[in-house]
Image (cartoon, rainbow, N blue to C red):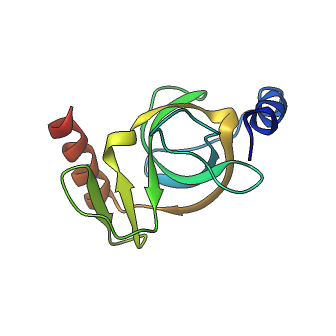
Amino acid sequence: MTYDTWNSLKKSLSEKPRTYFNKGEIWFVSIGKNVGDEEDGKNENFERPVVITRKFNNNIFIGIPLTSQNKEGKFYQKLKSFNSVAILSQVRLFDAKRLLRRIGRLDNTELNVLKENIRKLI
């Protein structure tokens, strides 16, 4: 996938209506074709699962990309309730227009542990 393909998709995303979301939900998010070691999306929508950790308003949120790879260390947290690994070092702000489809939800206990691990990291 190329930057030109991503830029075309990004233009269409900026015109789509907002999607309603809540803290703790896991969505496929069109995160794009990024630079260097920033986590990229996959497939034709440049998508990746992301857990929503903080909702600021109906338009923006803090999210953490997920991976199915079994990674360990202080920059990763295994999510038992979703059978995935959160990539803590890739935490970032997202616009709701990037949301594609909801695929799950973390339980509150696991979400609170995830947020505490982000606080420790930052």
Q: x, y (%) of residue 55?
A: 46, 34
Q: Nearer the viewer, residue 66 or 59?
A: 66
Is residue 49 positioned above or below 36 on the image? below
Q: Is 80 on the left-hand or right-hand side of 29? A: left
Tell me: residue 83, above or below residue 39. Answer: below
Q: Position of residue 88 (x, y in %)?
A: 32, 46
Q: Quadrant of the C terminus?
A: top left
Q: Is residue 117 above or below residue 8?
A: below
Query: Which one is in front, 67 or 20?
Result: 67
> How many circles with numbers are drawn on the protein?
0
Does 122 sit left or right of 42 as displayed?
Answer: left
Picture coordinates of residue 60 (x, y %)? Answer: 55, 28
- Residue under the point 43% across and 51% down: 24
* Residue located at (77% from left, 30% from top): 7
Where is residue 111 shown, x and y percent of the image?
32, 53
**83 or 20, which is in the foreground?**
83
- Report the residue at 22% width, 53% height from top: 113
Residue 14 appears left or right of 30 = right
Q: Quadrant of residue 20?
A: top right
Q: Is residue 43 left or right of residue 34?
A: right
**Quadrant of residue 103 within the rendered picture:** bottom right
Residue at left 67%, top 38%? 98
